[in-house]
Amino acid sequence: MKAIAAELAYFFRGQARKNIKLLTLYCSFLAGLVIMYAWLFRVLMWELEGREYSFITGIYWTITAMSTLGYGDITFSSDPGFLFSAIVTLSGVVFMLILLPFGMISLFLAPWIEQRLRYRATLELPEDTAGHVLIFGFDSVTRALSRNLQNRHIPFVIVSPSHDQAVRLEEEGFRVVFGTPTDAKSLRGARVENARHIIANLSDPENTNLCLTAHAMCTTPIATLVSEPDNRDLLRLAGADQAIPLKRILGHYLASRATTRGAQAHIIDSFGALQIAEIPVQATPFSGQSLSDAKIRQSTGLAVIGLWERGHFTTPHADTHLSPKALMVLAGTREQLQALEQITGEEEAEDRILILGHGRIGCAAAGFLEQRAVPFILIDREANVDCLDHVAVIGDATSSKVLNDSGIESAKGLIVTTNDDSTNIFLTLASRHINPDIRIVARANQEENVDQLYAAGADFVVSNASVGANILSNILEGKESIFLTEGINVFRRSLPPTLVGKSINDSRIRPLSGCSIVALERADGQPPLVVPPPETILEQGMGLILIGNPEQEKTFSRTFRDRRH
Ligand code: ADP
Ligand code: ZN
């Protein structure tokens, strides 16, 4: 059935679509001709023969005459009548029996056959193919991943079970193998045993099946996305090396950026004892101050390693102004974050968050807030039958009555997480209009809508595609790193032996590579040194946690020839 649908889809694309319009026009002309002849038939029958026929009979007579069937049940018996019949039959031969099939063949059949002959789906890669990433399931996440891979010159092949999709992707310049992802023959054709990594991005049952099949054939590592976090263990059992609950991660990302409650609620990731947290400036007493006046370092030990403001990431300087709308990226230990919590005090106890959309991502966001005792209200058009933990207000969030009744005017934060970007843009705009001070964190299902969500008034946008793609890219490159934004990562390296005994200043890490040291991990289990002063001596066994863009990261590796941790 799918195959037939895929073939039919051909007729609704490109040139074939234009030809369909032409065919419709031609058929309308034929219909007009039939109606005209039917009308003339009635008039002539009455005038010439004195017989009266209905319009339907006229249509019947015209069609049998034009198609040369001519049953002979209704005929003229005068010369002008015979002449009319001959004209109708002749025009039928020309317009119905010659031009119509000719048009059908030349406009549809011939190009379709030509296309089929030109494109023979690749069923097998050359035998010596090796080192490629195999992608199963092509959607916005894997499309963003493919862009990352192209930028990093990592070869990849997409396996697609749809001929139509395979054609389209090949037309776009991708390498594609046409085959069923869970079929051993397709996997062999995709040279799975020589692949560098498998990315499974199908449904949970299909991913499980794929893992089992691939795992039985080879030792190629498998990274799989998981829709239901509960299925992680099953996927691992089936042979997946990494099972990533993307929707849950996205839900946590959204929630941690929406709440102003407690610094520890904002931890986005960690390297051992070093925590990276993103906290709204609004949630701290530093709002409106410059970074040097805020004395965050002196009072808590935490380092501000970045600032987000409406989608822009900047590395702060001493005189950077801490706008209440911004989000600070902090690095430090749990104790230091607790120290910040002491300072921020109880101000944010009135935090109340509205979550629009109780799908898997909205549900994960709710779970995150619940764990941190942040009050929230969920709104969804329909009940989430998979969730037994939360009670949602049932209603269409695009209705201002529903929003107002849920207390949008007094809420502190808003998480917009429906599966439709137009709805998300609309909800962002409407909510910003009702409550100019609310902190809006929105989800972009398609990367191209990120800018529109910011334009609509979102304070922070989380793009499913780029978060998913970056998690997968980091796994593929075997990197231990935390993704802050497109182009900025926090990553870990062991201390290059050539730098042992030098001070940070003398190591010249920053001037030579552009990377900055976020923290030094110490071998003896002591807490990491967060943003150590330049005179700190680098000791044997220390780990470096650095911040930089991919180019700076590469320069660091080249310059210091370190071993990956
Ligand atoms: P995911 O699992 O990725 O979060 P879903 O499609 O399961 O995605 O979730 C999106 C949720 O958003 C659905 O539960 C849907 O009912 C809800 N939703 C979509 N549009 C609206 C709307 N206008 N008002 C309220 N809820 C909506
Ligand atoms: Zn839920």
Image: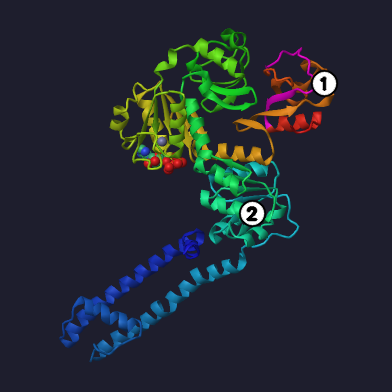
Give amino acid for label 2. Ala
Residue 533 sits inside the magenta stretch: yes
Residue placed under numbered mark 2 in the picture:
214
Asked if 69 appears above or below 230 in the picture, the reply is below
Residue at the spot x=82%, y=21% of the render? 500
Q: Position of residue 78 (x, y in %)?
A: 23, 91
Of callouts 2 and 1, the N-terminal one: 2
SS assignment at label 1: loop
Asked whether the viewer can see residue 25, the reply is yes
Q: Position of residue 479 (x, y in %)?
A: 68, 35
Q: Position of residue 119 (x, y in %)?
A: 61, 64
Residue at the spot x=61%, y=50% of the render? 135
SS assignment at label 2: helix
Q: Nearer the viewer, residue 502 or 388?
A: 388
- Quarter of the rendering containing residue 366: top left
Residue placed under numbered mark 1 in the picture:
500
Q: Is residue 524 left or right of residue 32?
A: right
- Quarter of the rendering containing residue 167: bottom right
Looking at the magenta stretch, what is its main secondary structure?
loop
Magenta residues (range): 529-549
Residue 149 sits inside the magenta stretch: no
Give amino acid for label 1. Val
Asked if 70 appears above or below 54 in the picture, the reply is below
